[in-house]
Image (cartoon, rainbow, N blue to C red):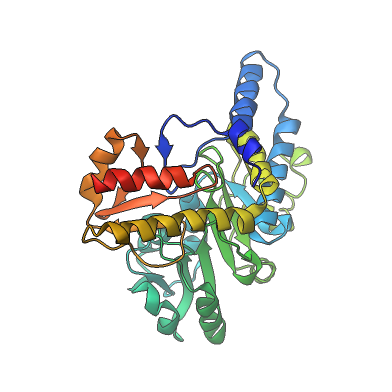
Amino acid sequence: MDHRLLAAEFTPEVCYLNTASHGLLPARTVAAVTQAATEMAAGHIDQVAYYAAVDAARAAFARIVGTTPDRVAAGSAVSVHIGLIAASLPAGATVLAPEGEFSSVVNPFTVRDDLTLRTVPLEELAGAVDGTTALVAVSAVQSRDGRIADLAAVREAARAVGARTLVDVTQSAGWLPFSADEHDYVVCGAYKWLLCPRGTSFLVVSGEAQKAGALRPLHAGWVAGASPWDDCYGPIARLAPDARAFEQPAPFLPYLGAAQSLALIEELGGPETIGAHDRALAARFRKGVTELGLGHEPVPGDSAIVAVPGLGELSERLTAGGVSLSVRDGNLRAAFHLYNTEEDVDLLLSLLEG
């Protein structure tokens, strides 16, 4: 990666290892949002340019996750996208998900009394798919401990019984190579590993799911029309012929920033290059924790998120030492991303050693 570019974009005042909670905003993103807010306050408002930024963000996201813009709907929250999917399922449908899955992925299905949510351990997910399964919902990378799902096995198991797949890539987009076209639905909150302002999210709907009418555009407003500027009064004559029919009105300031952040992800080489960097740092940390002999072993794997069960109680010591990370379900959770270095890993290890 271009280290001079990284130095120009990021100047954290702490050792920031908490991207799994929220990514750092690049300098270009901050500048774009600040300039737009200043112009809005002065009355210089250009909505055409703002919608162009939404389209630019949509296109960049599509490239990053391996799909095309016509399959991507912009939005502001993952739970809203999944709520739309949940509302479109037929009564009596069974949704299969991993135990301990992030709440936004599963809760929209539980609020419908006529749906069944069945959960199994992550490692057993593909094997648990059966003829009663209508949809498998899973995060590509688990939020609380960084485990990576076997998406290929889940996809094949679902296809074998005619079930659809829903993948949340909030904790993986930007560092884990992925092909969204291999799944029916993909959702992403872009404020973590994609470094966008909070309030940017994306829904990918496969071409097959669009043709089959699997989703009902229940919250279709004027931006979901085929020609929004020409058809914004009264019932919409014709919805967009692609995933934009499922679009939520995009908040301008977050998307003006998102267009900049996503461009940076691409400039730095995308998930392949960034993922190699992130995973190398995570591996260094896993190895270091084991060598310290603290009596607590990291969750194994090759994820950029490293969870160490039993060490959550040390978070205050780490914060006092200038390290920002998080505790999830008792796990000390460190997340390594493009702005982190080997020196960050070594500082964390030294503080754990005490």
Name the residue nearer the viewer: 5 or 128.
5
Task: Decide: is 246 above or below 88.
Answer: above
Res. 91 image quadrant: bottom left
Q: Nearer the viewer, residue 338 or 352?
A: 352
Residue 217 visible (yes or no): no
Q: Name the residue nearer the viewer: 20 or 92.
A: 20
Q: Is residue 39 above or below residue 268?
A: above
Identify the residue shown where x is 61% and y is 56%.
271
Locate residue 49, reporting x and y percent: 75, 32
Residue at 32 percent of width and 64 percent of height: 100
On the image, the x and y values in percent for residue 55 come to 72, 44
Instruction: Answer above or below: position of 85 versus 91.
Output: above
In the rendered view, does 226 fall on the left or right side of 329? right
Report how many numbered discs are placed on residues in the image: 0
Residue at x 39% of width, y 55% of height: 285
Q: Does residue 94 appear to the left or right of 205 in the view shown?
A: left
Q: Is residue 199 visible?
A: yes
Residue appearing at x 24%, y 53% in the figure = 311
**Position of residue 217 measured from the top left corner of the image (x, y, whole percent):** 60, 56
Quarter of the image for the C terminus: give it: top left
Residue 110, image quadrant: bottom left
Percent x, y of residue 191: 51, 43
Q: Residue furthest front?
A: 291
